[in-house]
Every structure is written in structure tokens, then in C-alpha cells.
Amino acid sequence: SLFEERYVAVLAPTHQLANRPSIGIDDLRETILLERDECDVAPKIRRSYFPEEPPRLGHCSGHDLHLQHMAAAG
């Protein structure tokens, strides 16, 4: 591959996955996700990691700060 990209999860400190050094895709399949509107990598992630069933989306917004506040609130 030409390059690698690192993805991060923004979680509330009290979230069950918050203290893990890494989070597996199976963990994400069981979690409600927030998505940035018009995210250019979201379709690729859905095709690659959620081929049978789409991820459970709790909210979608075009404003990163709004999503960060929602994640922090739990």
C-alpha cells in the first residue's frame, strides 16, 4: 500500500471501550456510532468492515465539534 491511515475513536471517559489501548472492529459492530456528514472514508469503512449489516448510527453531523460534544456526553 502507498500509505497507512490511523483512525481514532472519540469516547466519553465512562464508555466501556474508553480505557482500551485498541478497539477491534467487532467491538464497533456492537456500538452506536456517530458519523461526520459527507465523510469521504465512511463508504469505504462501511464496505470493508460492515459488509453484511450497516453500522448502528446514532447521529450524523457536518460539525466535528458537535460530534465531539455528543461523544463526550456519552
Image (cartoon, rainbow, N blue to C red):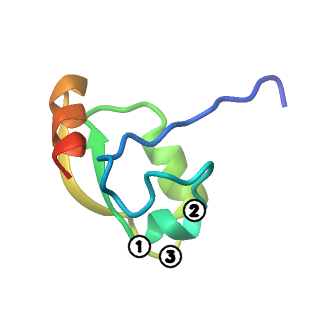
Q: Is residue 61 above or below residue 33?
A: above
The amino acid pointed to by label 3 is: Glu
Mark whose residue sits in front, 1 or 3: 1
Viewer-nearest of discs 2 and 3: 2
Q: Is residue 43 above or below residue 1?
A: below
Say which residue appears at 20% left-offset and 52% top-offset. Answer: 74
Which disc, if any, is residue 25?
2
The Cα atoms of the two marked residues, 2 and 3, are separated by 13 Å
Task: Name the one closer to the observer, 41 or 24.
Answer: 24
Query: What is the secondary structure assignment of the residue under circle 3?
Result: loop
Earlier sequence position, callout 2 versus callout 1: 2
Q: Which mark is residue 8?
A: none
Q: In which quadrant of the rendered image does the N terminus lie?
A: top right
User: Label 1 amino acid?
Assistant: Glu
Q: Residue at x 30, y 55 (%)?
A: 14
> At numbered mark 2, what does the secondary structure look like: helix, strand or loop?
helix
Residue found at the far right of this picture: 1
Q: Percent position (x, y) of residue 57?
A: 26, 59
Q: Residue at x 45, y 42 (%)?
A: 9
Q: Is residue 32 above or below residue 67?
A: below
On the rendered structure, is 65 left or right of 5?
A: left
Q: Say which residue label 3 marks.
A: 52
Please name the amino acid that badge 2 sits on.
Ile
| Foreground pick, 20 / 62 | 20
Question: Camera-side residue: 53 or 18?
Answer: 18
Classify 51 as above or below 47.
below
**Mark closer to the chain start, 2 or 3:** 2
